[in-house]
Amino acid sequence: MNRHFNIFYRLLTVMLLVTSSITAHAENYTTRRLQTIDQTLKLTKKNYHIHRRYNSYGEVEHIGLALFPTSLPYELRPSCDFLERYLLEVNLTSGTENALILAQKPVYYNVGSPRTALNIDSLCDFNINEIEYHKSRVTWNKNGKKLLEIVYDLDWRMMSGCDTRELEQNLIRNLKRHKASTFNPLPESGTYIIGPAFNNNLYLENNKDSNTRQYVFNKKQMPHSVANLMLADDMPNEAYADITFSLYDNTPTNITLKWRDVLNYFRNVEHCTPFFAIKKKQGDNIEGLLLLANKNGGYMHMISVSITPDIITDNGKGTFKARLTAYIPMHNVKQEYLNLTEYETLR
């Protein structure tokens, strides 16, 4: 009996060690699609040159064919990540699964085919051009010869590999864990989107103690102070946002987060450009709308806010109400949609 017990104990120990080893090396992924692709990749015997990238949390945030240089300006990354992942996925699958992927994606081949991508490497010349407001074209050339040319829609669900529900859940997860870090201040004289009312102009004044300038943030200049709060993640404040999410499945979701962390996430992680307009002033209370546009991903977020004077007068402390609608296709947002005539252009 002792002999059988010893054998059982040794087998159990081996099983636990194997399980621990597998668990220790298990990867975490930012999306379910990346996990599926990686599992398929590990099972196949195909020897592809792969790009794999991890985020600051140690999660796999990108897997794809090595079609572009690893060091790219951020504005190219959404398209490059999508094309590398998509062309890997197409070449990994076959039969009905492959046909479904090709059929459901608005991707068109002017030159070459998905298989052509297997003959391209990161040393090939490439060009990415916006050919319409919501379409892009990428071309790979080698020795002056065009190898592959693809036209695709700037559809963030397709480009991210997520459906709307997963995009929203990932956003909530990312907002909860993000802490403001590096800052990239906007220029004082900004630009606008859709109409002049939605702009990212900042308002500064001379600091009394030095020759430096500081953000306007006082009750006497309430509209300008609110605009600064909504746009400048580098402006010191302790405000919190009580955010209600307008989700695809209408699930009630509400979280309270430090506003600087929220704004910094959209600017520093998603690389969105903010634009703000005031919709209504009732006494000193202000209602406004913040648009966070990601042109390279073809989407924007909308955050409606209601700001009371105590947020401004108490050095940015306190909590304001906000409602967030995420990942709206940018080509769907028109002047009529926002009813721009109701918004006031700040001077």
Image (tube, rainbow, N blue to C red):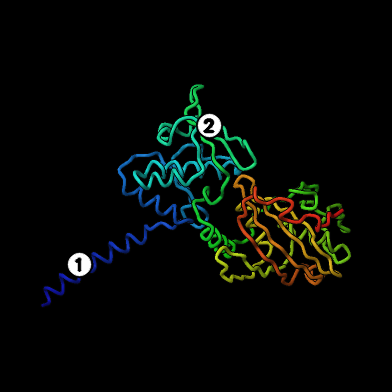
At x 47%, y 56%, the residue is 31
Q: Is residue 59 left or right of residue 220?
A: left
Q: Position of residue 51 (x, y in %)?
A: 45, 43
Q: Position of residue 167 (x, y in %)?
A: 54, 58
Establish if 216 lies above or below 44: below
Residues 239 and 89: in front is 89
- Could one spot residue 51 in this view of the protein? no
Query: Disc 1 or 2, which lies upstream in sequence?
Result: 1
- Could one spot residue 122 in this view of the protein? yes
Q: Position of residue 90 (x, y in %)?
A: 41, 42
Q: Position of residue 239 (x, y in %)?
A: 72, 68
At x 49%, y 41%, the residue is 83
Q: Which residue is mark 1?
A: 11
Residues 94 and 46: in front is 94
Q: Where's the N terminus, which quadrant?
A: bottom left
- Label for residue 237? none
Q: Which residue is mark 2?
A: 139
Foreground: disc 1 or disc 2: 2
Establish if 140 lies above or below 338: above
The quadrant where residue 343 appears: bottom right
At x 87%, y 58%, the residue is 209
- What kind of residue is marked 2? Thr
Proximity of marks 1 and 2: CB atoms separated by less than 8 Å: no
- What kind of residue is marked 1? Leu
Residues 341 and 242: in front is 341
The quadrant where residue 29 appears: bottom left
Report the Cα–Cα distance between label 1 and label 2: 56 Å
At x 76%, y 48%, the residue is 192
Residues 130 and 68: in front is 130
